[in-house]
Image (cartoon, grey):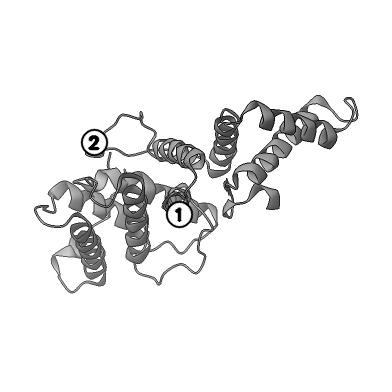
Amino acid sequence: MVAQTQPQMRPHVQHPQDPDVLAWRDYVGTVENCFLEIRGRGVHWSETDRTRASAWYALGLPAGTTVRVLQARVQAWRFRHGPNARLPMHLGWYEPAVLEHAKHLRQLGDSRLDPLIAEPEVVPTLTVTLLVAELAGLMAGNQNQVLGHVYSKTFDWLDRALHGVAPDVEPEADLASADPPELQVLIEKCRTRMTKLLLTALDDGARGELAQFLTTGLGPAGAVSHKARKMREERLTERWLAGHFGHSVPTAAGWRDPRET
């Protein structure tokens, strides 16, 4: 799905030296060059790709930012599926990441999202796109089999959440997310899923150690509300698992050791 916002081409677009026309051409040309460099030989820039890039231009996302988003998606995909994995043939696969990035900039209050101005000074600390790319780096440096499984499952889930699609959708499918996921909600769900996966990997001895740790850490029942006690139990469990497996979890500042959050 192409972003609904289309560039407003005024009647004077016939004049090739018009600043608006030059800015549009520079943006589309930059995205085209990046995409063709990513895809390599045998891939052509289609009219659909041009239309989609024009729609991104109309959103006001600077060309340099758009290129970095595309590169982050490719980096994550290749980490997950290998350096020779087939890459999408069109821009549609990248669009959810671009739209999510634009939405995040607006949420930060950056009112200068205009294609004719300099790069925004406000840089988003994190988006789902960057979260996935950072996880790919963790996967590349991991040697633990259990963590490898958990990170792979987490990567796939976050990647699907970004696109809003089923797990078996091919990368060639023309996809886009009209409503990018809320980052904080996704982070909490992600941490819960990771905890459940890691718990299933514990043997009986480790489970006993965890139970003793929770008994000591939680204290007597009734001291706090049931909800507060449950939340504390979840965080204590997550921290104990981090000491056992040495994994990182997603936070609003990136992937961190849960014992430090």
x, y (%) of residue 57? 30, 57
x, y (%) of residue 212? 79, 31
x, y (%) of residue 94? 31, 47
Q: What residue would you read off at disc 1?
A: 141
Residue 54, quarter of the rendered image: bottom left
Residue 180 in view in this figure: no
Task: Name which residue type carries label 2.
Answer: Ala
Of 41 and 57, the residue lying toward us: 41
Is 118 located above or below residue 43 in the figure? below
Q: Which quadrant is home to the N terminus?
A: top left
Q: What residue is drawn where x is 80% and y is 25%?
A: 226
Is 117 located above or below residue 176 in the figure? below
Residue 72, quarter of the rendered image: bottom left
Task: Name which residue type carries label 1.
Answer: Gly
In the rendered structure, find residue 30 and report the number of the disc placed on it. Answer: none
Q: Cα distance, mark 1 to mark 2? A: 30 Å
Of 117 and 35, the residue lying toward us: 35
Q: Residues within 10 Å of mark 1 (few under 14, many from 20)?
A: few
Q: What residue is drawn where x is 53% and y is 44%?
A: 183
Q: What residue would you read off at disc 2?
A: 173
Say whether disc 1 or disc 2 marks the residue closer to the N-terminus: 1
